[in-house]
Image (spheres, rainbow, N blue to C red):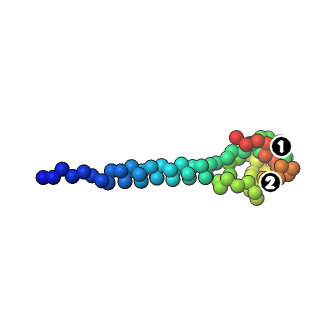
Amino acid sequence: MKNTKCFSCPKKKFFEGLKILKINFKQMRYKKKIYVVRCPKCHHDQKYMPRDGAVKGKSKRCVYCGRNFTLHPNPKKSRIIKEI
C-alpha cells in the first residue's frame, strides 16, 4: 500500500485560525461598557450597562428611590459620572 499524506490538516489549521479571528473580532465589536450614573432625585451612584452599548435614548430606574431618568450622550445633560 502506498503511504499517502493527509493534505487536509493545513486547511483545518487555517480554518481554526479564522474561527479564532472571528471570535476575537466579535468580542472587540460588542465590547460592553459599564457606566456609573447618578440619580437626579436621591443622588445615589449606580452601575449601568446598556445591552447594545449605545447610551442615546436609554432610561434607567433608580434602585433606591424608583424614579426613571434618561441617560444622555451630551455631557451637560448627562447623569453619567464615569465609564468603567
Residue that label 2 marks: 72
Q: Is residue 82 above or below residue 9?
A: above
Residue that label 1 marks: 42
Residue type, label 2 = His
Q: Position of residue 33 (x, y in %)?
A: 67, 47
CA distance for labels 2 and 1 = 19 Å
Residue type, label 1 = Cys
Residue at 50 percent across and 50 percent down: it is: 21
- Residue 80 visible to the viewer: yes
Residue 51 falls left or right of residue 4: right
The image quadrant of residue 56 is bottom right
Residue at 73 percent across and 54 percent down: it is: 55
Residue that sits furthest to the bottom in the current view: 57
Q: Earlier in the sequence, mark 2 or mark 1?
A: 1
Q: Is residue 38 above or below residue 57?
A: above
Tell me the crowding category of disc 1: few under 14, some 14 to 19, or many 20 or more residues within 10 angstroms, Cα based: few
Residue 42 falls left or right of residue 61: right
Residue 77 falls left or right of residue 14: right
